[in-house]
Amino acid sequence: MADIIKATTRTEFGKGAARRTRRDGKVPAVLYGHGTDPVHIALPGHEVLLALRVANALLEIEIDGKDTQLALPKQIQRNPIRGSIEHLDLIIVRRGEKVHVDVPLELKDKERSGAVVLLDMQALAIEVEATNIPNHIVVDVTALEVGDSLTAGELELPEGAVLTIDPDTTIVTVSTVAAEPEPVAEGEEAAEGEGGEAAAAEAPAAAAEEPAAE
């Protein structure tokens, strides 16, 4: 289900106008796609922030209480300090239309004794219907042992979704935990140090014994 967001059209543009829009608690945005002219709108900031907590959030934009459009976030500009949304590019989609998206991956049963599960990528590129985009894709590694791996083609995808990357791409590998170096006793460290100092002291004498080159 898409989140319904009520928007108003913007007639002022530029940095100054954008700042005024944000001071009013709204997010300046532009809506485009499917051959339509770009529409500049203002969205309620809090509602948009909540809706975009999930990746690839499908929004239903109601403009000036009249027309509605389904849209996906194309580009999100955030404030680097506060994390608030400063500008949003939205692309229009249609019901039944397939879109290309990167869906976050989530590991299942990743805890292993004496092994570590490595996720080689954080998101999976798929083609899926705009109204059926999953929030995440589960990567079940329950049956994997040390030395095993899992490829993109072995993942369970949502109904109707297809990969847009090579199915042989490695997604997960299971490796052994690197062994920690054994601690060295203080006496051994001292002995090694003395040996190194003795070798250093002997080196000049040995060099002095060698005849000078002609």
Image (cartoon, grey):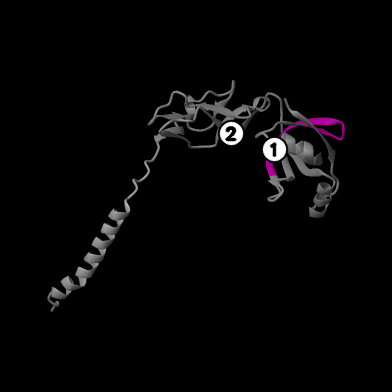
Q: Residue at x 68, y 25 (%)?
A: 131
| Residue 158, horizontal then vertical, whole percent | 59, 23
Circle 2: element type: strand
- Quadrant of residue 212 in the image? bottom left
Where does the magenta region start and end? 61-76
Which quadrant: the C terminus?
bottom left
| Residue 136, horizontal then vertical, whole percent | 60, 29
Q: Which residue is mark 1?
A: 73
The majority secondary structure of the magenta stretch comes to: strand
Judge by depth and name the residue closer to the eye, 129 or 113.
113
62 up-or-down from 183: above or below: above
Q: CA distance from mark 2 to mark 1?
A: 15 Å
Q: Earlier in the sequence, mark 2 or mark 1?
A: 1
In the orientation shown, which residue stands out farthest toward the front?
187
Q: Amino acid at mark 1?
A: Pro
Q: Residues within 10 Å of mark 2 (few under 14, many from 20)?
A: some
Left or right: 74 as drawn, with respect to 116: right
| Residue 174, horizontal then vertical, whole percent | 42, 32
Circle 1: element type: strand
Q: Which residue is mark 2?
A: 104
Q: Residue at x 67, y 26 (%)?
A: 97
Q: Is residue 35 magenta?
A: no
Q: Amino acid at mark 2?
A: Pro
| Residue 31, horizontal then vertical, whole percent | 76, 39
